[in-house]
């Protein structure tokens, strides 16, 4: 399943033509890299929305702990295999089985929930869609 050819050359034009493919391509691209999805600016932004103290560094720690501790009994799950809101209970349960401390569970949860959101929801660090109406236009205001 993880041995698929990299689709990086196809990604730019395909995602432009069929926006719905973005998620699927993202998953294929993810399988080209070693390990779980990296800590991108989108992951940091999603994590900070729920945990203001999260940093790129703390999230990278969570990602590494996740790789070290969560692949002992089964394959490493993809963050997006669970909805963001499903991760807290799962990490608590699985973290206990992995013998993790509360602090370790917390950083792993922050990485997993944010990486899941980053895979499933629009990137909060990107500019708004230019085709959507602008929030304010001083010159075109028609005075109503
Ligand atoms: C001691 C063994 C063990 C460790 C360590 C472990 N798991 Fe699991 N995990 C299991 C077993 C067994 C299952 C099968 C479902 C069950 O028993 O609840 C499972 C299932 C899962 C599932 C699927 C749950 C579902 O409902 O589809 C996820 C996701 C998961 N584990 C994530 C993790 C994460 C994240 C970690 C690290 C924090 C982790 N696991 C560490 C034993 C482990």
Image (tube, rainbow, N blue to C red):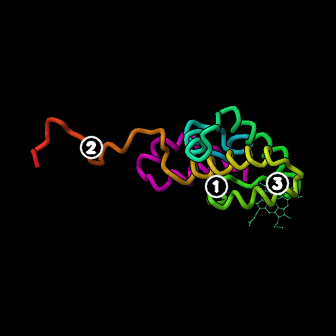
Q: Earlier in the sequence, mark 3 or mark 2?
A: 3
Q: Which residues are magenta?
A: 2-29
Q: Nearer the viewer, mark 3 or mark 1?
A: 3
Residue at 57% x, 47% y is 118
Q: Residue at x 43, y 53 (%)?
A: 18
Query: Badge 1: few (under 14), some or many (20 or more) residues near its Cα, within 10 Å?
Result: some
Q: Residue 88: where, in percent of width, then height? A: 70, 57
Mark 3: which secondary structure? helix
- Residue 95: mark in rendering: 3
Mark 1 lies on residue: 80
Q: Is residue 14 magenta?
A: yes
Q: Residues within 10 Å of mark 3 (few under 14, many from 20)?
A: many
Expressed as whole percent of the image width and height from the top left, the position of residue 96 reads 85, 56
- Quick one: quadrant of the N terminus? bottom right
Q: Which residue is disc 2 drawn over?
A: 134
The nearer-to-camera label among 3 and 2 is: 3
């Amino acid at each position: 399943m993880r041995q698929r050819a990299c689709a990086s050359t196809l990604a730019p034009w395909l995602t432009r033509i069929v926006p719905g493919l973005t998620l699927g391509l993202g998953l294929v691209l993810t399988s080209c890299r070693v390990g779980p999805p990296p800590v991108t600016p989108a992951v940091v932004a999603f994590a900070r929305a729920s945990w203001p103290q999260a940093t790129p560094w703390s999230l990278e720690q969570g990602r590494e702990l996740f790789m070290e501790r969560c692949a002992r009994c089964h394959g490493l799950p993809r963050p997006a295999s669970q909805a963001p809101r499903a991760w807290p209970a799962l990490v608590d349960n699985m973290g206990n089985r992995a013998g993790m401390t509360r602090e370790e569970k917390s950083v792993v949860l922050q990485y997993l929930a944010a990486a899941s959101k980053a895979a499933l929801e629009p990137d909060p660090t990107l500019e708004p869609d230019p085709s959507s109406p602008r929030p304010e236009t001083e010159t075109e205001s028609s005075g109503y």
